[in-house]
């Protein structure tokens, strides 16, 4: 709530309530700011926080790796690559105008594929390599490769394409408008609903693949469904907000600490709530400097998330578990 | 009686690249309901592979496994999970997971898509924890219990899974001696009290021999099965160690290293003191059994009221010691 009330333009409390309930505040620009700017931004923060945290939880359980997360393992970079391929590669062929409803869906789906592709690569490697840190380093490399390919694509693309991509890549919570939300809300909801259906699978996966299978789980199918959910969640957010770091890794651990359980049902719901809250607070902090200066959201989440990650690495030297 | 598991011409192994490598070939055997079977063999001989194949965690290379007269590959996934439960060598490490939570996972083949346990399920879980004697630790975190207790939690989980057959891969690995005995004894109790059919692998022959109804000895070129006692009487057990420096003692039922004899010793005495002095002398390489005229040393055990004294005759000297330790120090 506070996220809606504070911003670079001061608007009286009473008028904000009026705007939210669709009554006239007396000033058109106030209505505009609240409904077209601050409200979408708050909704996006809630969606992004929930989606990234849940995808982080799923990845940590799947890989049985306490440091897994969409940003750290390069899933977000994969999603960016998907978007780059569409915006820089195909858009001229199809003459797609950015901002349209169809284009938004195309971008989101490209991000899903990009995220899913990197996730698949990491999974295949994790079948052979068991070491938590090795997989982490490989994930960072995948991320770098994706970023490098994006640079190459940028180099070979024309001015119009480049402009549309650069605008996209500067994406943040505040860039999300109503037409984006029309795609983002259903995407994240689909991802979360699939996520909630994977709770039992994730619980069994906690014990490892052999145990999961011996207790009757269809491991292959479960993996596919979990990956589907993770790719949709991480991909959708990256498509519209750009990469947001460390939330996906840190929030599941905060939830484990708060609720002292390994039950994925409790943790997933906790991730949705805590993740949304953390990102709303991050967004609030990003406006603290005042005078219209807004810090990039990725900076804030890094500052909040990295201490948690460092803490996990230190703790991990004693107990290697999630 | 009808066998619960029937194994016909089974070859198991794994794919090494494109090549298939058999570790166990053409195995024919069966398991009766309520049996405790110990699978014995060297490391890498294929015990785990065999157990994993029986538990359907990997495909056989050829041949078939029937459970209740039905090929295991024909069972539906969820039905099969109600027939066989499995404990692997992996140690489950989870923060914030209680003993009860872990045992509760065993109910998952019976619960719905969301894994919600009914009141009846909860009762079965409590019973399973009680059966392995861990009720007092039910709410303890699994990272805060001993290795032996954790192994019993894993067994309780198979009880919650309520399967006729339980398959355990090296359940005594990583355990200290008392826990090794307790875990295998628990398995034996489950076969007798609950009618479970249990297969476990181990390289701990001594413990397996004390509890198992039947041993499967897997050797590089052959497969031998039978009750531990029959196998001893047929010299099968001592044959296993032919190639090694180990020697099986059919009287004591245990193993020792074959030693070079340094000489013979005349030993007189009785009771436990005699048995343990004999062991100490054998440890030093003395033969105390062969009747012989030129003894290298002579040891007499003298028992007085509350004390035992050891008299050593060596090089025409007579020495007396108050403990076996002092005796052995002097001989050495």
Image: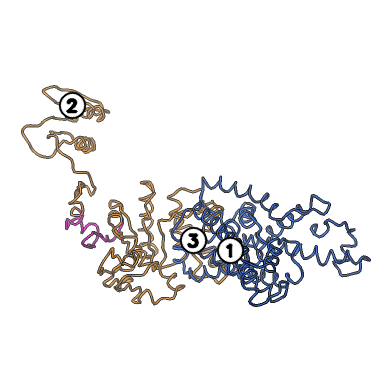
Chain colours: A blue, B orange
Tell me the CA gap for discs 3 and 1: 49 Å
**Placement of A197 over or under B302, stated as above or below:** below
> Residue under circle 3?
B127
Q: Nearer the viewer, mark 3 or mark 1?
A: 1
Task: Return the x and y of residue A253 as percentages of the image width and height.
Answer: 61, 53
A46 relative position to B142: left or right: right
> Residue A78, which numbered label?
1
Residue behind mark 2: B311
> What's the residue at 83%, 56% (across, down)?
A8
Q: Which residues are magenta?
A: B211-237
Q: Position of residue A88 (x, y in %)?
A: 63, 68
Q: Nearer the viewer, residue B69 or B309?
A: B69
Element carrying mark 3: helix
Q: Residue at x 45, y 62 (%)?
A: A211
Chain bearing tag 1 is A
Q: Nearer the viewer, mark 2 or mark 1?
A: 1
**Crowd band around label 3 with a 10 angstrom C-alpha radius: few (<14), some (14–19), many (20+):** some
Res. B300 mark: none
Query: Which quadrant holds residue B16?
Result: bottom left
Mark 3 chain: B
Reply yes or no: does residue A57 show up in magenta: no
The residues bearing labels 3 and 2 have C-alpha atoms spaced at a distance of 58 Å
> For numbered disc 2, what is the local secondary structure?
strand
Please state the total of marks drawn on the protein image: 3
- Which residue is found at the position 37% from the left and 52% from the top? B172
For the C terminus of chain B, give its image quadrant.
Answer: top left
């Amino acid at each position: 709530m506070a996220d809606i009330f504070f911003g670079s333009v001061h608007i009286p409390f009473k008028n904000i309530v009026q705007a939210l309930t669709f009554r006239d505040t007396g000033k058109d620009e106030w209505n505009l700011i609240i409904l077209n700017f601050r409200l979408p931004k708050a909704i996006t923060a809630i969606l992004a926080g929930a989606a990234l945290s849940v995808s982080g939880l799923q990845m940590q359980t799947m890989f049985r790796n306490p440091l897994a997360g969409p940003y750290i393992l390069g899933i977000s970079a994969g999603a960016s690559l998907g978007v780059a391929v569409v915006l820089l590669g195909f858009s001229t062929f199809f003459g797609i105008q950015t901002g349209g409803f169809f284009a938004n869906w195309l971008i989101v789906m490209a991000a899903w594929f990009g995220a899913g592709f990197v996730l698949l690569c990491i999974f295949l490697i994790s079948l052979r390599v068991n070491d938590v840190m090795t997989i982490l380093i490989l994930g960072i490399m995948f991320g770098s490769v994706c970023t490098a390919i994006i640079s190459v694509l940028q180099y070979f693309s024309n001015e119009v394409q480049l402009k549309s991509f650069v605008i996209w890549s500067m994406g943040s919570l505040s860039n999300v408008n109503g037409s984006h939300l029309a795609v983002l809300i259903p995407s994240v909801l689909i991802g979360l609903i699939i996520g909630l259906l994977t709770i039992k699978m994730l619980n069994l996966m906690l014990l490892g693949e052999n145990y999961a299978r011996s207790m009757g789980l269809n491991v292959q199918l479960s993996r596919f469904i979990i990956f589907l959910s993770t790719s949709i969640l991480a991909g959708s957010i990256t498509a519209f907000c750009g990469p947001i770091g460390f939330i996906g890794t840190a929030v599941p651990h905060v939830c484990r600490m708060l609720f002292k359980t390994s039950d994925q049902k409790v943790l997933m719901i906790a991730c949705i709530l805590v993740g949304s809250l953390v990102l709303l607070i991050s967004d609030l902090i990003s406006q603290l400097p005042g005078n219209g200066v807004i810090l990039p959201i990725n900076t804030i989440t890094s500052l909040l998330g990295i201490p948690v990650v460092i803490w996990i690495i230190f703790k991990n030297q004693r107990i290697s578990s999630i | 009686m009808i066998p619960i598991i029937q194994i016909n011409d089974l070859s198991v192994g794994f794919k090494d690249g494109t090549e298939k490598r058999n570790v166990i070939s053409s195995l024919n055997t069966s398991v009766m309901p309520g049996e405790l079977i110990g699978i014995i063999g060297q490391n890498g001989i294929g015990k785990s592979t065999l157990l994993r194949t029986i538990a359907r965690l990997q495909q056989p290379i050829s041949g078939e496994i029937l459970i209740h007269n039905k090929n295991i590959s024909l069972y539906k996934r969820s039905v099969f999970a109600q027939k066989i439960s499995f404990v692997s060598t992996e140690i489950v490490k989870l923060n914030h997971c209680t003993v009860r939570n872990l045992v509760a996972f065993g109910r998952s083949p019976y619960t719905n898509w969301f894994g919600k346990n009914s009141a009846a399920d909860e009762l079965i879980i409590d019973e399973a924890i009680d059966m392995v004697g861990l009720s007092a630790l039910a709410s303890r975190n699994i990272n805060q219990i001993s290795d032996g207790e954790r192994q019993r939690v894993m067994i309780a989980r198979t009880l919650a899974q309520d399967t006729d057959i339980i398959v355990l891969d090296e359940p005594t690995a990583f355990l200290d001696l008392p826990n090794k005995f307790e875990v295998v004894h628990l398995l034996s109790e489950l076969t007798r009290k609950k009618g479970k059919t249990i297969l476990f692998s181990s390289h701990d022959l001594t413990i397996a021999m004390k509890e198992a109804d039947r041993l499967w000895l897997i050797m590089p070129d052959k497969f031998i099965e039978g009750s531990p006692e029959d196998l001893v009487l047929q010299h099968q057990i001592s044959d296993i160690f032919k190639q090694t420096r180990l020697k099986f003692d059919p009287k004591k039922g245990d193993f020792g290293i074959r030693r070079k004899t340094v000489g013979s010793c005349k030993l007189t005495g009785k009771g436990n003191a005699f048995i343990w002095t004999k062991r100490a002398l054998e440890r030093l390489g003395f033969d105390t059994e062969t009747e012989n005229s030129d003894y290298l040393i002579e040891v007499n055990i003298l028992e007085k009221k509350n004390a035992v004294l050891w008299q050593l005759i060596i090089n025409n000297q007579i020495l007396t010691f108050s403990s076996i330790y002092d005796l052995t120090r002097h001989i050495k």
